[in-house]
Image (cartoon, grey):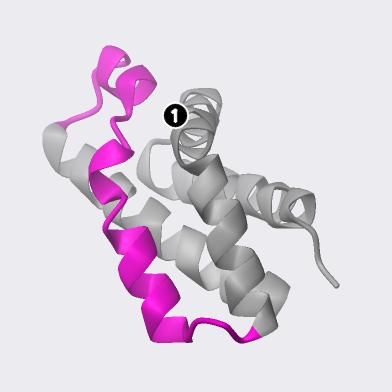
Amino acid sequence: MATFDDYVKELRKEVKKLAQELVDGLQADAISDMNAFLRKSERDLKRWTRQLADGEITKQDFTDLVQAKKALAELHELTKAGVAATKLDRFRSDLISLLINTAMKVYL
């Protein structure tokens, strides 16, 4: 069975790809912002991914729970780097989607 560390490792790979597409050259800032989000949400994400893997919650439940955390993705590093607001919003939305899709890939 996959661990939370497996999940985070896969997320880091995917965030690098996403950052390359949206904010080329700022992968380190994007990963830093993702790590900050993970620190804020780690306890909940660990519980929810375990529940997802164990079948205690549905894919839709997991999706709803993660999407509710979207406001915690503050993206300070990308903001300091001068990334436009529209790109920040897209990155934030895509990050939430990555959290969800990666969990489905790793745990199911």
Range of magenta residues: 55-84
Residue at the spot 28% in from the left edge and 31% down from the top edge: 74
Image check: 55 left or right of 87?
Answer: right
Residue sitting farthest toward the top: 80
Residue sitting farthest toward the right: 1
Q: Percent from the top left, x then y, of residue 101?
A: 51, 71
Image check: 50 left or right of 37?
Answer: right
Measured along the vertical axis of the image, is residue 99 above or below residue 39? below
Q: Which amino acid, mark 1?
A: Asp
Q: Percent from the top left, x then y, of residue 98?
A: 48, 61
Residue beneath disc 1: 33
Residue at the spot 67% in from the left edge and 48% down from the top edge: 8
Viewer-closest of 23 and 2: 2
Viewer-closest of 82 and 5: 5
Viewer-closest of 94 and 53: 53
Measured along the vertical axis of the image, is residue 61 above or below residue 46? below
Viewer-closest of 70 and 18: 70
Q: Quadrant of the C terminus?
A: bottom right
Residue at the spot 47% in from the left edge and 23% down from the top edge: 29
Label 1: few (<14), some (14–19) or many (≥20) C-alpha neighbours in 10 Å: many
Residue sitting farthest toward the front: 56
Q: Quadrant of the N terminus?
A: bottom right
Is 101 in the magenta? no
Measured along the vertical axis of the image, is residue 31 above or below residue 82? below
Residue sitting farthest toward the left: 85
Q: Percent from the top left, x then y, of residue 30?
A: 46, 32
Is 63 in the magenta? yes
